[in-house]
């Protein structure tokens, strides 16, 4: 899978090595283990998906983490992205609105030895103010915007990576704490539901 990601343009060696260390097959259902490393998203329950490896790698690369960073992940899902981040940073705080997914991800990450990840069941769209500020924030579901309340949880030198758009198509956006943005092409994610996400 790492060679495939390199062919797709992923260059950050730390990211590639982190992905190589995370057993992706552990984060999908039993029926999907044989296709876990294919470059496509897979269903994980509750209408959610585990993103394709390229998208995980690209978003992680754009996040530009350092080993001392604390990262907020908005949307835990099965915990795969949190595990990749845990290979790269000091601490990951991951928020998941579905209790069943939060519980399963917490148990799996603990079993795999990821002691620097905390999974919290809450409205992920609101972030997690009690532990702010964060050096990096990663939104792993489609969002109509970066909510101001979430942006205030970013450190002064921080950055947010998010898929921003409507329910059909989003653009991968990097925004720093001063509001400057970079745009990195179209993506498709399941919607971020909650008070600061899509309603319904």
Image (cartoon, rainbow, N blue to C red):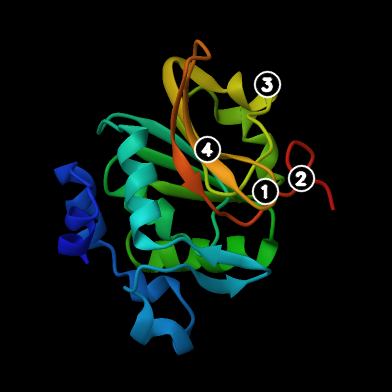
Q: At 43% from the left edge and 35% from the top edge, which residue is drawn?
A: 71
Tags 3 and 4 touching, CB below 8 Å:
no
Q: Give x and y (percent) for residue 63.
A: 37, 34
> Looking at this view, is 11 or 192 the one in front?
11
Residue tagged by mark 2? Answer: 198
Q: Give x and y (percent) for residue 60.
A: 35, 43
Residue tagged by mark 3? Answer: 148
Q: Which mark is residue 162?
A: 4
> Looking at this view, is 113 or 39 the one in front?
39
Q: Nearer the viewer's eye, disc 3 or disc 4?
A: 4
Q: Nearer the viewer's eye, disc 2 or disc 3?
A: 2
Q: Secondary structure at mark 4?
A: strand
Q: CA distance from mark 4 to mark 2?
A: 14 Å
The answer to which quarter of the image holds residue 165 is top right
Q: CA distance from mark 3 to mark 4?
A: 14 Å
Q: At 62% from the left edge and 57% from the top edge, which residue is drawn?
A: 190
Is residue 114 among the parts visible in the rendering? no
* Side (left or right) of 87 relative to 6: right
Tags 4 and 1 touching, CB below 8 Å:
no
Q: CA distance from mark 3 to mark 1?
A: 15 Å
Tags 2 and 3 touching, CB below 8 Å:
no
């Amino acid at each position: 899978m790492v060679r495939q990601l390199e062919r797709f343009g992923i260059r950050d060696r730390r990211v590639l090595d982190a992905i190589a260390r995370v057993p992706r097959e552990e984060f999908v259902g039993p029926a999907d283990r044989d296709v876990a490393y294919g470059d496509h998203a897979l269903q994980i329950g509750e209408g959610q998906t585990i993103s394709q490896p390229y998208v995980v790698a690209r978003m992680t690369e754009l996040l530009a983490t350092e080993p001392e960073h604390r990262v907020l992940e908005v949307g835990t899902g099965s915990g795969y992205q949190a595990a990749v981040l845990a290979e790269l940073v000091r601490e990951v705080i991951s928020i998941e609105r579905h209790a069943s997914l939060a519980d399963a991800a917490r148990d799996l990450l603990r079993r795999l030895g990821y002691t620097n990840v905390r999974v919290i069941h809450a409205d992920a769209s609101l972030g997690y103010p009690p532990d702010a500020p964060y050096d990096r924030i990663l939104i792993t579901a489609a969002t109509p915007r970066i909510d101001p309340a979430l942006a205030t949880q970013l450190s002064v030198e921080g950055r947010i990576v998010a898929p921003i758009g409507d329910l059909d198509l989003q653009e991968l956006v990097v925004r720093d704490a001063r509001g400057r943005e970079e745009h990195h092409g179209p993506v498709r994610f399941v919607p971020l539901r909650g008070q600061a996400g899509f309603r319904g």
